[in-house]
Image (cartoon, rainbow, N blue to C red):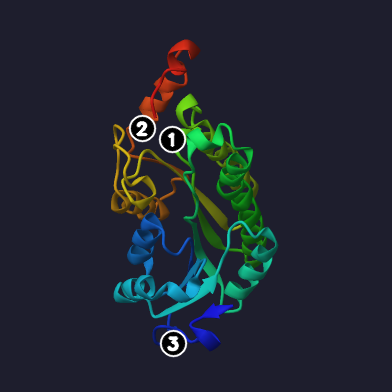
Amino acid sequence: MTHPPAGRDLTTPDQSSTGILLLLGGRSDIGLEIAERLARGRHVVLAARRSDDLVAESERVRAAGATRVTTLEFDADDLASHHGLVTSVLAHGPIDTAVLAFGILGDQTRAETDAAHAVAVVHTDYVAQVSILTHLSTSLREQGSGRLVVFSSVAGARVRRANYVYGSAKAGLDGFASGLADALHGTGVRLLLIRPGFVIGRMTEGMSPAPMSSTPGQVADAVVRALGSRTDVVWVPGRLRLLVAVMRVLPRPIWRRMPR
């Protein structure tokens, strides 16, 4: 279903020939920063739950130069709806770039004893991503072009005791996205894998920033730069790559005591 009612768009008709920019997670701090940077001359589709309440986000993207903004209902955990969502987007035209910016951090302490909560975190951060990526990549293969932006995390590089539920989901997603990127090679479809560290934003509100933290704007800048290059994997900030190399060789007794 498209919102506002009757499929009314929030801007003027699309005059862009660059294809649709799809943001899955239409309220995401990082996703909206990326959309602002890529919006000019494009038809932007914002997909999220309660899509009739995306007025401010839509206006923000329109102010950045989008020629048209459409909002679509998207519940990441409703896997059965994913095919229909992709079909609805394609009804507006070809997809140029799809940004998967949805996910939850969850409560690690709760997840250690509440199996349903642990499964919910993994379902949103891994299973739902696998589902929508499969639907999108299939359609983009048929289209013969398109770009997918997927967010892994430093938390998945080597899973820590302090956040192993979230970290394990990101580790799984990283592996899936890496394999999918290889499978898409030569098809005209490109997958860009982003591995940020701690990002200061709504998702981490109330938490003390970790070393080498970044802002949503800094992550978005890195994504846009990478989309304009041949890079397929991006660490944000870049020096995280060296830190992770050290992390991977730390003895387990030391690693076990590592904080978030």
Is residue 212 shown left or right of residue 181?
left
Which residue does the image show at 52% across and 66% down from the upper left? 49
Q: Which label's residue is closer to the chain start, 2 or 1?
A: 1
- The dot on residue 240 is 2
Residue at (43% x, 35% y) in the render: 154
- Residue at numbered disc 3: 13
At mark 2, the secondary structure is helix
- Looking at this view, is 104 or 225 the one in front? 104
Q: Nearer the viewer, mark 2 or mark 1?
A: 1
86 left or right of 61? right
Along the line of sight, which residue is nearer the eye, 51 or 43?
51
Which part of the image, by quadrant, shows the C terminus? top left
Residue type at tag 1: Val
Q: Work out how far the residue at label 3 is from the one at label 2, CA to CA, in angstroms.
A: 42 Å
In the image, 183 versus 7, the foreground residue is 7
Please state the horizontal and vertical placement of residue 42, each as a whole percent of the image.
Answer: 42, 74
| Residues at discs 2 and 1 in contact (Cβ within 8 Å) | yes
Distance from label 2 to label 1 (Cα)?
A: 8 Å
